[in-house]
Image: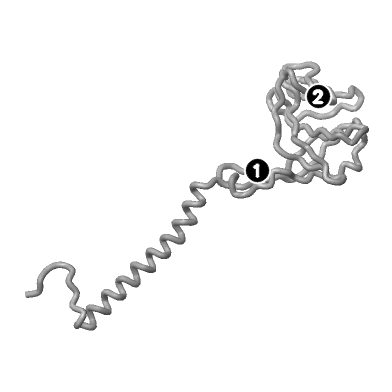
């Protein structure tokens, strides 16, 4: 009678081959699991926002802007939503001063997020939803909005405007 347990008779070629094949299969399964598991852990534990996002976005050429006249400029930016990276089209209201200083405002009113527009004849930004009015420098002139327009960080490379993160402005700071 053969004893119970994990004893291998290496003199029997069939049993030695069987153990070699079982060990090879377990080794391949472990290799595949470690490769797939490693990538899955990276995906789950390191959000996309930490995987190398360029925070500055090219918007356009500021040479074509008229000084002291806000212009709505359209551009594409990458937004990270959890682990999903989304490329979306958005706009900014850009004003260039005579000394080539540039200010870029987010396109939403700070009251409830409606899209506002520039009224040239009144020389002000007007939100049609609740009639908030903002000056050319983004300060609240009238309406239910209590905060100035939010601004993008802006820098100029040559004549190309680059926009960075959006800054929410406090009521006492324009």
In front of the other: 29 or 88: 29
Say which quarter of the image contains residue 147. top right
Point out the image quarter for the N terminus: bottom left
Residue at 83 percent across and 22 percent down: it is 135
The crowding category of the residue bearing disc 2, from other C-alpha atoms within 10 Å (few below 14, some 14 to 19, many at least 20), is many
N-term mark: 1 or 2: 1
In front of the other: 125 or 46: 46
Residue at 75 percent across and 35 percent down: it is 153
Would you name the residue on which mark 1 appears? 79
Taking 154 as reference, is 45 above or below it? below
Residue 11 locus on image (x, y percent): 19, 82
Asked which secondary structure carries label 2, the reply is strand
Label number found at residue 126:
2
Residue 44 locus on image (x, y percent): 49, 48
Label number found at residue 149:
none
Residue 64 locus on image (x, y percent): 91, 42
Whether residue 137 is visible here, answered yes or no, is yes
Q: How is the image coloured?
A: one colour
Residue at 73 percent across and 45 percent down: it is 76
Q: Judge left or right: residue 40 versus residue 18.
A: right
Mark whose residue sits in front, 1 or 2:
1
In front of the other: 82 or 31: 31
The crowding category of the residue bearing disc 1, from other C-alpha atoms within 10 Å (few below 14, some 14 to 19, many at least 20), is some
């Amino acid at each position: 009678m053969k004893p119970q347990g994990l004893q291998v008779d290496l003199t029997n070629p069939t049993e030695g081959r069987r153990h070699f094949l079982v060990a090879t299969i377990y080794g391949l399964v472990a290799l595949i699991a470690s490769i797939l598991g490693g990538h899955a852990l990276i995906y789950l534990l390191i959000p996309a926002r930490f995987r190398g996002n360029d925070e500055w976005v090219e918007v356009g050429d500021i040479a074509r802007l008229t000084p002291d006249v806000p212009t709505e400029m359209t551009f594409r930016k990458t937004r990270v939503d959890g682990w999903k990276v989304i490329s979306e089209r958005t706009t900014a209201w850009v004003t260039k001063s005579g000394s080539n200083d540039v200010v870029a405002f987010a396109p939403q009113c700070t009251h409830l997020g409606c899209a506002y527009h520039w009224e040239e004849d009144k020389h002000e930004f007007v939100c049609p939803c609740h009639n908030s009015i903002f000056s050319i420098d983004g300060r609240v002139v009238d309406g239910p909005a209590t905060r100035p327009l939010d601004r993008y960080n802006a820098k100029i490379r040559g004549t190309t405007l680059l926009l960075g993160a959006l800054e929410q402005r406090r009521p006492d700071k324009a």
